[in-house]
Amino acid sequence: MAGSLNKVLLIGRLGADPEIKQMVNGKSVARLSLATSQSWKDKNTGEKKEKTEWHRIVVFNEGLVNVVQQYLKKGAQVYVEGQISTRKWKDEQTGQDKYSTEILIQGYNSSLTMLGGGNQNSIASQDAKQTHEDNNISNQSDLDDDIPF
């Protein structure tokens, strides 16, 4: 369909250490649990309120999976750019249809960037950027290398 866009941008913190699994085809996949929060002041009471949303992130890019495994831990702050996807599956115990909504990191139009201070984060971000560039060498003529993240 022309004129449609499926793009998600999130900044949040990992709620747990990444989970790395091997797929049937032998490639690795990383699963992340990302928390985003918003806070506000209640107009009636003046009390500070906060709401946290949890997002399932699935990283299919092999190079980024290696970076995730090596550098990311619970509490790390990350910027994620990907596609939202809802998949349907059947619960084996109840036989009921279940749905999972995930943010997919795959291909040239998605990214994962580590945020925050510290030397390790800087090195890992550079490694992730280099890996991303290496994996998409054939698409470089379509990309603008001056992107600041």
Image (cartoon, rainbow, N blue to C red):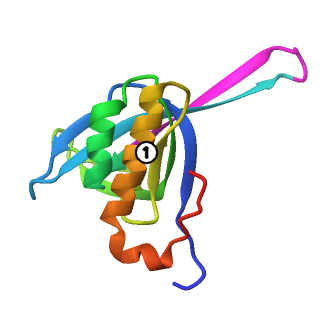
Left/right of residue 91 with respect to residue 41 in the rendered view: left
Q: Which residue is mark 1?
A: 126
Q: Which residues are magenta?
A: 43-57
**Depicted 111 relative to depicted 70: above or below:** below
Residue at the image point whose x is 55% and y is 29% from the top: 116
Give the residue at x 64% y 27%.
Answer: 51
Q: Looking at this rendering, what residue extends furthest in the right direction?
A: 44
Given residues 77 and 52, the one toward you in this image is 77
Regarding residue 23, the answer to whether it shows in the image is yes
Where is residue 84 shown, x and y percent of the image?
A: 46, 57
- Identity of the residue drawn at 31% across and 56% down: 88
Magenta segment, prevailing SS (helix, strand or loop): strand
Out of 72 and 57, give the one closest to the viewer. 72
Residue 100 shown in magenta: no
Whether residue 121 is situated above or below residue 113 in the rendered picture: above
Q: Residues within 10 Å of mark 1 (few under 14, many from 20)?
A: some
Query: Could you say which is closer to the camera, residue 2 or residue 72?
Result: 72
Q: Position of residue 137 (x, y in %)?
A: 35, 70
Lateral position of residue 141 relative to residue 4, left or right: left
In the rendered image of this protein, does residue 87 appear above or below residue 22? below
Residue 25 picture quarter: bottom left
The amino acid sitting under disc 1 is: Gln
